[in-house]
Image: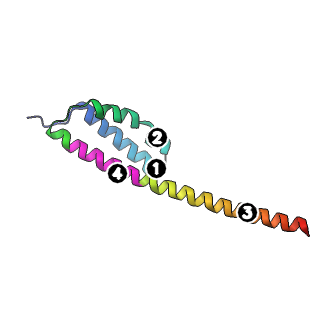
Amino acid sequence: MDVAPHPDLQRALEFSAQMLLAARAGDWAAATAHQAECDRLLRQAPVNAAGLMALRRLYQDQQELLGMAAAAREAVEQKRASARTNHRAVSAYINAAGSS
């Protein structure tokens, strides 16, 4: 009986861990850099009993990444909304000052 996941699954787990570390640090370019290779490894790797455990871990990592990405998108959108509001306020002030 196989006790270790296929090497491709093991490598995908390593990529997943690197992606999580980068996302936690806010480096989204690095967090997504390995996604294509991770996906390729997952598609080609045969799954044994140990591989099922690796897939479960990968799924958990991906769920965490998706949650962090959603939170990051929300933070960016809040900053954009605040910047738009500030821009409108400054424009209104400039227009009012120019009318006087």
Up/down of 16 relative to 81, above or below: above
| Mark whose residue sits in front, 4 or 1 | 4
Q: Mark 2, mark 1: which one is toward the viewer?
A: 2
Mark 1: amino acid: Ala
Q: Name the residue rendered at 53%, 58% in the picture.
A: 75
Q: Position of residue 85 (x, y in %)?
A: 68, 64
Instruction: From the image, tell me which residue sits under label 3.
Output: 88
**How far separated are the C-alphas under marks 4 and 3?**
38 Å
- Tell me which segment is drawn in magenta: 53-67
User: Magenta region, mostly helix, strand or loop?
Assistant: helix
Ranked by sequence position, the earlier of labels 2 and 4 is: 2
Residue behind mark 2: 30
Going by the numbered disc 3, the residue's amino acid type is Arg
Helix, strand or loop for disc 1: loop
Examine the rendered structure and indicate whether residue 96 appears above or below residue 52.
below
87 is within the stretch colored magenta: no
| Crowding at mark 4 (Cα within 10 Å: few <14, some 14-19, many 20+) | few
